[in-house]
Image (tube, helix red, strand yellow):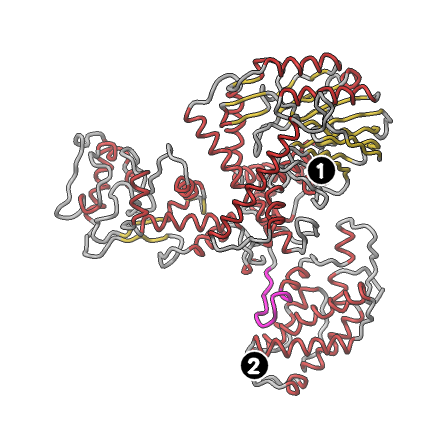
Amino acid sequence: MAEVEVPVENDDGSDEGIIGQESMEGVEGVAKEVEATISVGIAVGVDLSGCEVVVKKSIEDEGVLGGDEKGPWIRELRCKFGIDFVALQESKSDDLSNFDFSKLWGNKAFGMEYVGSVGQSGGLICLWDSSIFDFNVVVKNRYFLRLSGVIKGSGKRINLINVYAPQGVAAKNVLWGLIEGELRSSSGLWAVMGDFNAVRFAEERKGSIFKNSCASNFNSFIHRTGVMEYGMKGSQFTCIRDNGRKLSKIDRVLVSSEFFNLWPDACLRALPSRFSDHCPLLLSSKVSSYGARPFRVFNSWLLLDGYEEVVRKAAMEFEFEGSPDTRLSRKLAFIRGRIKEWKTETDDKLHQEENLAVEEIDKLEQVMGYRNLNEEEEWVYVESKKVLKEAAVINDLEGMIRRFLWGGSSESSKIHWVAWDRVASPKSVGGLGICKLGVSNIALLSKWGWRFKEENNRLWVKVVEAMHNTGRCWDFIPTNNALRGVWNNIVKVLSRTVVDNMPLRRFFKGVVGDGVSVAFWLDPWVGNEPLKEMCPNLFRLERNKKCKVNSRVGNGGGWSWYRMPASSSELEELDFLVNVVESVELNGRRDKWSWLGDKKGNFSVRSVRKMMYDAADYSSLYVLKWCKWIPAKCNVFMWQAVMSKIPTADALIRRNMAGVEGMCSVCEEGLESVEHLFTSCSVALMVWNLICKWTHVQRFFAFSFKDLIEMHDHVGLKGKAKVVFQGIIFISCWAIWRARNKLKFEGIKIKVEEVVSEIKSMGFLWVRSRLKMYSLSWSDWCKYEIM
């Protein structure tokens, strides 16, 4: 592939000047940020002196590639729309040689070229499907990246230019001349796309100054080269800044007449912006239909609440009279339809807040096209963007955890053998016990809501009340929607997180003592709802809506109405209220709060997490009984193996891994699967025979891996002996797998005696230290005299 570097020159032929000035500003900006970061590190007790290169690299990677949300967002768009060519601007990284671009593309089957940034200014990236395009010419310039080659299959010549124009009017005019030269240098189809940093007409800019000279130069370039534009759908503007106050159409796709005539019905659409101030532009050359998509049920669906119930209910409700084969076909189709409906509803519930935020952003971006947003709309727009960023941060952090768990990293990917929903389920229901960050975040935020009610004399509580408990705020956890900040998010979490068909806020209940701090109408103290919701008609008549319980109960109590209750509904509510008041007796104890998610009424972050996990249905999962005296790595291995989620030949073939030999590498007598390797392989059978002789148990035969896991329940052992034997089975499976790996990857032949010796030595070390059998000697262990 030919590669050419093209300098940008000024009118006098020099390579510096206007563009060189911008370069220095970008470099100086990064240097200042590095210096500031090191200063902040020292202030918080982290010495980053000598780590300037690492800090600089980290700052530069926070552009279009390194952001918590932009990388996954780009990958999602590419996969969703089946995009064959991606052009990115503002990578803000000068060296991307070690970056894993598959994180943007979604797989390894792609080609890539890039132009590095200068400091944090600029940077261009092009990615393409290598089965569609074959590029053999690359022309690089700081402000554009040209790729030329052919479209495979048709053999048509195609030239694509990715543009990121500079700010200055003169510098842009120089760039137009260079791009014009490229357009005239080669035949074939042409498409020039990217951020041109210029508009053509005054109506393409709103809220900022229209520069007539800049537009004139740009229009002159378009007329000279004869390039054309498709009508853009989706939005009138492509760049949205300052919360919608500044709008412009500076991103475009310009194509040659040959390109336009070949695809006259192509559609250019501005997609909603999520994590950028620029809208992605999607050019689709044709409408493709690949027929009906096959219906698939994924194992992860089994973990979701209600799946089994939907299937059972659909099977029972189905009615059809006809031949058996037709009845079976219709019944499966009926169940499939119900599952699809259930999955759609479930996805909507799981991502309700994100979906609402997306809808709000899309609606408001349409409004921006013809008028300015009012104050309330601008607040909604900012908050919706914030919701998407918060969700993206959690997804990105969980992605890092998943990669680390399976031995991968940001530079290399590994097979994720078990679905994250299963991994993040409690051990007691068949998971690995790793808590989801979203669940932990909700539980930790809930703690602040609890502390707000329980620690009502603290200074921070008084500050929150002063800011949020306005005159017409009648909520037991007050919030002022006109203010932005952490407290609003905490209240939002308590209101929107639903467990057992109740929001978390419903699990707070006041326990009345002296009645001084619990609000009579606003706090939930009679049931899990405040009296203002149980008696709404009387609440409207109440003069002092924030009164405390002691002002309405006991000798000093009484009512304070705007008028006496008169209607039947008001009198009915009054009768209920009188009964409530008469049943309450005040005492000298301080009012306190009870958490309904705990039997003892005590709040804890753990109880919130447990409550959220308990609400899910895990009945379809096999629960492994972990052995406590062996290391976690052995237990995790057994947990994976019982699900056939270890890299046996059978598992790799099912995942379409190339170059995998199916035969068992240990005995070469059958397909290597979990069942074969541990229950029917000749080496495994010899190991189990020697284990039985050593432990003085009757020889057993396992027909499945689950039989092995549960063998300690069926060999006549009790108490500690039974626990020890369970660990020996787990260690033996671990040792057989280690021996298999040494044979496969190091060529070390398996000797059964050595495998059993390793089982004994590891078992002795762990049983003494972890089961605290300190008096056990090596000779007694070898004779298996453990009691």
| Residue 478 left/right relative to 552 | right
Q: Is residue 632 magenta?
A: yes
Q: Is residue 288 above or below residue 324?
A: above
Name the residue nearer the viewer: 589 or 305.
589
Residue 773, labelled with which disc? 2
Mark 1 Cα shell of 10 Å, populated few (<14), some (14-19), many (≥20): few
Q: Give how far across and how far down residue 349 sits, in percent.
A: 52, 39
Foreground label between 2 and 1: 2
Q: Residue at x 48, y 55 (%)?
A: 45
Name the residue nearer the viewer: 496 or 284.
284
Q: Quadrant of the N terminus?
A: top right
- Boundaries of the magenta span: 623-635
Q: Which residue is mark 1?
A: 294
Name the residue nearer the viewer: 359 or 411.
411
**Would you identify the image quadrant in which residue 503 lies?**
top left
Res. 404 in view: yes
Res. 620 in view: no
Question: Please, which residue is most extreme toward the left here?
Answer: 555
Q: Give how far across and how far down residue 751 sits, in percent.
A: 80, 75
Q: Give how far across and how far down residue 649 sits, in percent.
A: 78, 57
Name the residue nearer the viewer: 519 or 451.
451
Q: Earlier in the sequence, mark 2 or mark 1?
A: 1
Q: CA distance from mark 2 to mark 1?
A: 57 Å
Q: Is residue 28 magenta?
A: no
Q: Which residue type carries mark 1? A: Pro
User: Tag 2, which secondary structure?
Assistant: loop
Q: Which residue type carries mark 2? A: Met
